[in-house]
Image: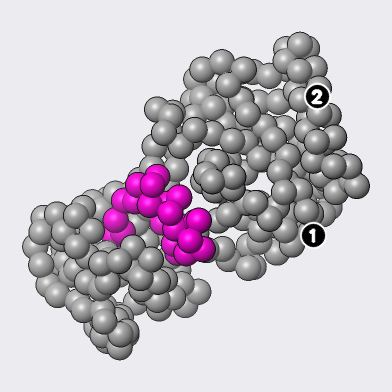
Amino acid sequence: MDVAEITLRIVSADDILLHEGQDPLVVGALAQRLKQDRILRNPPIVSEAEGRYIVLDGATRTGALRALGLEHSLVQIVDYAAREISLSSWHHLIQRTSPSEFFDQLAALENVTVERVDVRQAEHNLTLHQSLCYLLLRNGAAYQVRGAEDLEQSVFQLNQIVALYRGKTQVYRAVTTQLDMLTREYPDLSIVVVFPCYTPFEVTRLALNGAKLPMGITRHLIGGRAIGVNIPLERLASAESLEEKNAWLQKWLMEKIHERKVRFYQEPLFVFDE
């Protein structure tokens, strides 16, 4: 990957779309830090679709910049179809929760059903999007949660499910369902909520339609991130037009490259020195 492939741009905040929900407390805390530092170190990473910018990584940063009232934001634009980008899902690890009580809460949701299945069947149905998610108990029992088949409606129901436990108990994220490993690391583990893997097309469709997945489900691995950019917030907040700001940005970027202050790491990352 070459430094010339980096695409940094200052865009209108109104053109930036989220595909997942946010935690207002986390957004508020970051907004306060940004207000004190007056610097945006790492730009949100977005893909471009229909003239809009879909946030793949950096939803909290996006929300914090909006909370500060900034009409423009610096973003790094990537090709969602590039081989350096992969999309998978996180699993939610629920602590200190009674499975029977949780099942009762699920049963109270409209058009949502829960049934005991074999783990392999649960994985198979989830892969085919024939279930919303499945639950894996610490004893190894698996239960699939069925609901709507329509993408937007199924996402609405997923938000209802996550709302049953988010903010009410400790929730961690993991990429594995190996219970022996998880219970060693999380002794109070009660339930693993396993979510489907979405496609870039589905993520883009949801964002463009105004639907949002629950926070902390999609997992984007992105090579060639631009970090340590350190753009002053006053530059983003200035009265200059987008054209003027982007002209300044390109000049600044060329100077960094000329001074050899952009370094490539095999992970890969791009780091900008001050």
Query: 118 left or right of 39?
Result: left
Image spot of residue 136 (x, y percent): 22, 64
Magenta range: 193-218
Residue visible at 49% across and 29% down? 223
Q: Earlier in the sequence, mark 1 or mark 2?
A: 1
What secondary structure is found at the residue carrying circle 1? loop
**Residue identified by numbered label 2:** 252
The quarter holding residue 213 reads: bottom left
The amino acid on which the numbered mark 1 sits, given as a three-letter code, is: Gly
Image spot of residue 271 (x, y percent): 65, 26
The quarter holding residue 270 reads: top right
- In the depicted structure, whether residue 221 falls above or below residue 64: above
- How far apart are labels 1 and 2 at the CA level? 24 Å
Q: How is the image coloured?
A: one colour
Which quadrant is the C terminus positioned in? top right
Image spot of residue 178 (x, y percent): 23, 51
Residue visible at 68% across and 55% down? 14
Taking the magenta stretch, the answer to whether it contains residue 236 is no
Taking the magenta stretch, the answer to whether it contains residue 200 is yes
What secondary structure is found at the residue carrying circle 2? helix
Which label was assigned to residue 106?
Answer: none
**Residue identified by numbered label 1:** 69
The foreground one among 254 and 267 is: 254
- In the depicted structure, whether residue 2 falls above or below residue 198: above
The foreground one among 274 and 258 is: 258
Residue visible at 48% across and 61% down? 209
User: Local crowd at mark 2 within 10 Å, few (<14), some, or many (≥20)?
Assistant: few
Query: 32 left or right of 51?
Result: right
The foreground one among 96 and 36 is: 36
